[in-house]
Image (cartoon, rainbow, N blue to C red):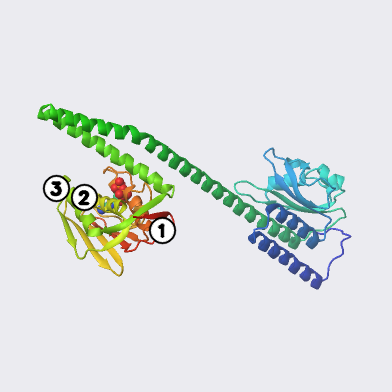
Amino acid sequence: MIESSNHAEPSREAALELRLRQQEAVAQLGQLALAGFATDALFERAVSLVAERLDVEYAKLLESLPSGDFLLRAGVGWREGSIGSTIVPGGPGSQAGYTLLHSEPVIVSDLTAEPRFTGPPLLLEHRVRSGVSVIVQGPGRPYGVLGAHTSRRRVFTHHDIHFVQAVANLLASTIATRKAEQESARLLEETRRSLRLRDEFLSVASHELRTPLTALLLQLQSLARMLMKQDASEALVDKADAAIRHAGRLNRLVEGLVDVSRLAEGRLTLVIEPVDLAEVAEEVVGQFRDEVEQTPIALEIESRPVGSWDRIRVEQVVTNLLSNAIKYGARQPVDVRIRSADHKAVLTVRDRGIGIDAKDLKRIFGRFERAVSVRSYGGLGLGLHAARRIVRAHGGRIWAQSAPGEGATFVVELPLRAHLGPNASGISL
Ligand code: ADP
């Protein structure tokens, strides 16, 4: 393209020097973007670098509005007060609109003789003659247009266009990254909010259910005692027993929920006293042997570690692990083993049932987390979560080893002297 110009042709060296300085400007903007420079400040720096390194009087970044027009978002050289308020018409009525419509850089040698579009008021008012404009892409749709203009006639070279386009591309990728960051921050906040709401609901609902349920259980028990005294028929007493069992189960579920909401709120007070782990295991295994006749349970006591722990909580851990071993153990024998190791007590509960997929081994200790393969079994996915919170509160560890179809082994390690975890406080008896 040959144009007469009053912009002096630079020498080869000067042109090379200019190109290097333009590249350096793009690198500088990239560093600022990476360093987290505020978006508006980055826009301002971008337009002033464009003006300076192209040696033009005007530079502008126009933001495309939903109406189809543009807002002058950042600029250099324009009359005072125009940034942030001047609207530039979209469509073929302006160089920016034309750029957007044709999706390619547009060079204007002489706006007064321009056949493709009319100059918008902003350019006319500033007696703009020549210019170049490129699209700034955005996530989904174009963000807007970046342009450089002069009031004297100027021939823009393809190097100039590459420079403006490089700045525009950098702005585009920054805009896209920041939008994605904003979106993920919003999603995170939304998730946190719904988790908070769920916890609140859980806490309120479980506490509300607890009182009438406890009353119901007590009433049923006294009803059963009355029936026995009055020599009621066996069928009637059996019915009362069944009702007590069901209410008891419901009560345990609700207690589990209350417990979990208490754990979620980080309130775990351990009542520390000397506890014989083997004794706890004997009691829990004894109860299960009475209740569950189909599953043989072997208890191997290698040693009798006595630690400073919360007895009720430790019992809860053993109960949770054993009830899972029975539930998911396919009626195969279950082994419970107690031993001491290095100032620690170690409890192992092993079953020979359905096993656990490797990808679920850690997840199942999370709140409400259950393996997909157990959807047909009843359960809330809270037992292991509570067990882990309790073990950690004592300064211990719990983990599972398993493979699908090959049973599961749960191991609990408790330091003999509980060193309380961050979410626990202790009362020593
Ligand atoms: P629940 O048993 O009520 O679902 P838990 O928190 O006790 O809740 O267990 C979480 C999940 O871990 C279970 O849903 C199950 O998928 C898996 N799980 C726990 N123990 C075993 C086990 N012994 N064998 C196989 N899977 C188990």
* Circle 1: residue type: Gly
Query: Marks 1 and 2, Cα distance to the nearest angstrom?
Result: 30 Å
Please state which of residues 321 and 331 is positioned toward the viewer in this rendering. 321
Which residue is labeled 2 in the image?
A: 326
Q: Position of residue 267 (x, y in %)?
A: 42, 49
Answer yes or no: is residue 167 visible.
Answer: yes
Picture quarter with the C terminus:
bottom left
Q: Position of residue 295 (x, y in %)?
A: 15, 50
Numbered tag placed on residue 421 in the rendering: 1
* Circle 3: residue type: Gln
* Circle 2: residue type: Ile
At x 69%, y 51%, the residue is 135
Labels 3 & 1 near each other (Cβ < 8 A) = no
Picture quarter with the N terminus:
bottom right
Answer yes or no: is residue 108 visible.
Answer: no
The residue at label 2 has a CB less than 8 Å from ligand 1? no
